[in-house]
Amino acid sequence: MAALIEKKTPNLPVRFWEKYSNRRLAKNRTCAKFPSLYKLNYVDTHWQELQTVNGPYYLFGAYFDNRTLVERAPSVRIIGQIARINKKPTLFCQLWFEEHKEPAFAPIYEHRYLWQRVMGLHHNGVMQPYMLSCQVPASFKHDVPQAVSVVERPCDMAKTILKVFNNLPQSGHKEGFAVCVKGISIPFIDFSVRLVEWLELLFILGASKVMLYDHDMHPNVSKVLSYYEKQGRVEVIKLPLAGRQPNVFGLLNKYLKSIGFGKAYQETLPYNDCFMRNINRYKYINVVDIDEVILPKNSSSWKTLMDVLVPKALNESQELTPSDYVMRHVYFFDDMGHANETVPNVPRYMHMLQHVYRSPNYNKKTHYVKCFHDTDRVLTVHNHFPLSCIGGKCSSYFVDTADAHLQHYRKYCVKGLAKVCEEKYRNNSVLDTTILRYKEPLISGVTETLFKMGFLDHLLKQDFSGAAFLEQN
């Protein structure tokens, strides 16, 4: 039962609570008692509320960070939001351990902002994403905390408690790559076939795990993700919005559209939750959308690509080991290419394999890029770049487009490029068949999956020559 509850609400320490709550965990009778899970300040299934003199904090996840380069290791990182930008109150962690009846107390030594002020929205009334950090006291440094509560005074009776993620690999060694995807809020469009093709390509390239966040999803999309979850290759986490924002099916999607650029603001929380959950399990984290893929030009996989990039980056910098490897952005528009032309021997439902014409121009070097983040060095991530790195300044390595780039499949440019889209990105096209190197295994994997899920017969009867299918996606 406890395992099932934690699967549905992974940030709640249910198993720890059931195992140790009868031991009366506390500092003493009047100080820092372990809170009952029945008496927490739940906002919904995934958020807990901490009332402070500066207003409510909404807490989402907690993570153990004992990486070699972390100055205050080991630390516990806590991700949450607060709708204020005033001076932050003094807060403390109550840290709970397997082998100790009493908690350890540790002050929050950092409120790290998970956004860039220059990008706007830095004002009261907007949910501000933060990472709070507290250092595990020296007398407990050989123990891993299982749960953490955040309080204003050490002896307070906590109204929040979060499971502390550690997620050490069973082998003791990190795997290669994981992919993090923002909260998906597309409840009325069925992009399940496109999603299968995208996931199968990621697995061919070398992704061991893809983690996605669910605001609102079409039933067929949920069905696809459930199929891959059972295989252990995908993890889906339900993601309601914090506080009093609308979490009503369908209305949530409209709300996110209504706040415009604020939607990107909401995305940093799931990105950083995913990143912190996986810092011990994977060497590199790739933060992308479901219509993007990093594609090597001359290498067969992400691993063989990094075998080329790592020594090249070290040779060029001669001093700094890169914190992240930055891929230039290029568009593959849905209507680009010759009218009604199809790629031979490729099913019409394979969107990426059927779209092999791209814009001749890349976006600017730092615009709309995506990265492979080195989990030994990056501390927090943004939609495109790392926000901060361990030890100070990040050392980004910009990958030559002859080695790899980011393929972005869209109908049109993003809003910020609308005025120059036709002239700069859509006037001409370039044939780019790099993806066809993966044609055989990709067609095989997608077709098998669609058949097993019962989607294939319906697809084979569709006419993909019209605009209706493209309009859905």
Image: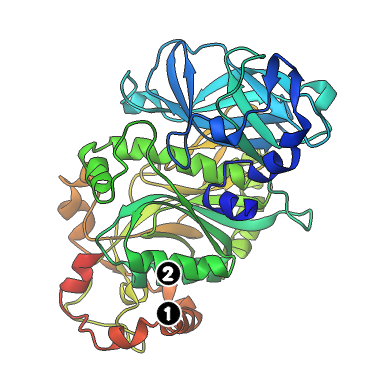
Residue 298 in the image: state x and y as whole percent: 53, 68
Which residue is labeled 1 in the image?
453
State the image quarter where residue 322 is shown: top right
Identify whether 384 is placed above or below 294: above
Task: Tell me which colouring the rendered structure shows.
Answer: rainbow
Residue type of the residue flagged with mark 2: Val
Observer-nearest of 398 and 375: 375
Q: Residue at x 23, y 52 (%)?
A: 413
Identify whether 187 is placed above or below 429: above
- Residues packed near mark 2 inside 10 Å, few (<14), some (14 to 19) or many (20 plus): many
Identify whether 436 is placed above or below 265: below
The quadrant of the image that shows the C terminus is bottom left
State the image quarter where residue 175 is shown: bottom right
- Residues packed near mark 1 inside 10 Å, few (<14), some (14 to 19) or many (20 plus): few
Q: Residue at x 39, y 54 (%)?
A: 289
Which residue is labeled 2 in the image?
224
Q: Tell me if 309 is positioned left or right of 80 in this view.
A: right
Residue type of the residue flagged with mark 1: Met
Looking at the image, tell me whether mark 1 or mark 2 is earlier in sequence order.
Answer: 2
Residue 5 in the image: state x and y as whole percent: 57, 51
Q: Tell me if 291 is positioned left or right of 133 in this view.
A: left
